[in-house]
Image: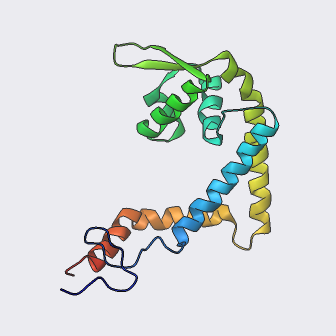
Amino acid sequence: MPGPRAGAVRLGLVTGSDPTATPGRWQLVHALLAEMDAQIESLYVERGIEGVRPRYAYPLIRLAHTGPLTIRELADSLGRTHSAISQTVAAMRREGLVESEPGADARTRRIHLTDRGRALVPFLAAEWRATEAAVAELDDELPHPLSAVAAELEAALRRRSLRDRILAHLDATAPGS
């Protein structure tokens, strides 16, 4: 019985090369966005704001303007999934930024800001505006503005979804194809 090929991974039936060994385009985009978020978060820490992630700003600012909302209402108002907002709310609750109270029925809870969450909103709104201004500045520096690329990407994905594109490649490279 022949042994595994050179460079093969010895886990179960995996014998091909590791596609994660070199950074691809998707990883580069994720890494860049993660670095930008890390820089925003570092501003929070420099201002003495601990335990607050950039992803909390959007729901905290929205709750400050709308008052208490259910997770579904908050998710819908932000254009996010229920699951994503549920996870974010749980994390914000652990940091003492939001609390929940019984909703209209036993299955719903209304999320509202704590005093700590409310106190952070003016800074977060200012940071939001400053970030938008900084991104606009970056947009103006780039030969292909990020906002234009994002709009073009959105249009391309409306023509053919990422899911469909991935499936086409999966089907073309599936074992036995």
Task: Confirm whether residue 161 shows in the render.
Answer: no
- Judge by depth and name the residue closer to the eye, 94 or 1: 1
Residue 124, placed above or below residue 157: above
- Judge by depth and name the residue closer to the eye, 109 or 87: 87
* Residue positioned 51% across, 22% down in the render: 69
* Residue positioned 26% across, 84% down in the render: 3
* Residue positioned 36% across, 74% down in the render: 9
Quarter holding residue 103: top left
Which colour scheme appears in the figure?
rainbow
Q: Tell me residue 28's x, y (percent).
A: 59, 67
In the picture provided, is 152 more to the left or to the right than 148? left
Number of marks in the rendered image = 0
Residue 88, placed above or below residue 141: above
Q: Tell me residue 17's x, y (percent).
A: 39, 79
Task: Confirm whether residue 120 shows in the render.
Answer: yes
Quarter of the image with the C terminus in it: bottom left
In the picture provided, is 149 more to the left or to the right than 20? right
Quarter holding residue 127: top right
Q: Tell me residue 76's x, y (percent).
A: 47, 35
* Residue positioned 54% across, 72% down in the render: 23
Quarter of the image with the N terminus in it: bottom left
Q: Tell me residue 37's x, y (percent).
A: 67, 49
In the picture provided, is 118 more to the left or to the right than 153? right
- Judge by depth and name the residue closer to the eye, 163 or 114: 114
